[in-house]
Amino acid sequence: MTGVTSHELFRRIAKRISYTVGSPIVCLLAVVLVVGWAIAGPFFGYSDTWQLAINTTTTIITFLMVFLIQNTQNRDSKEIHLKLDELIHAMKKARNSMLDVEDMPDAELARLEGEFRKEAKQRTRERHGLRDDDRA
């Protein structure tokens, strides 16, 4: 793999692992592992070693998966934002101020959300032939 940076290699590995562990087969394997561990309990006398095996395994896996999944989600979020930004640029009636919406304070986001809800409600009323003074 000539020319692949360590950052790019990590991204590829993280994405592949994230998608793999999200598959039904891996979920089934996890269930089988836990059921197998539970069945083995009586044979090991529910010993500390028996408990430590599952606790250590799940702790390590969880710890590593947090970073891998967060990396994948951050990238997916960035990709979606870029695609939405491109759509905003392409639309003549779109507000360019929406390009930086992810940097707006929460109060401004709440104001915009209220504005869009009001607009959606108005369009729904218009679609049903209702006027502002009609009751829905």
Image: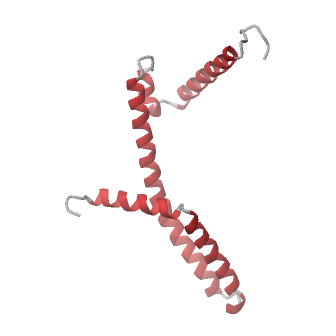
Quadrant of the image occupied by residue 103: top left
Q: Residue furthest left?
A: 2
Quadrant of the image occupied by residue 17: bottom left
The answer to whether any part of residue 67 appears in the image is: no
Q: Left or right of 16: which side holds 119?
A: right
Q: Nearer the viewer, residue 87 or 98?
A: 87
Query: Measured from the top left, where is residue 55 in percent x and y?
Result: 60, 76
Query: Measured from the top left, where is residue 132 in percent x and y?
Result: 71, 9
Residue at 51% from the left image edge and 72% from the top image edge: 60
Query: Measured from the top left, where is residue 113 in percent x and y?
Result: 59, 26
Quadrant (top left, top right, bottom left, bottom right) of the C terminus: top right
Query: Measured from the top left, where is residue 28 in percent x and y?
Result: 61, 70
Q: Nearer the viewer, residue 79 or 65?
A: 79
Residue at 69% from the left image edge and 81% from the top image edge: 38
Residue at 30% from the left image edge and 56% from the top image edge: 8
Q: Residue furthest right?
A: 135
Quadrant (top left, top right, bottom left, bottom right) of the N terminus: bottom left
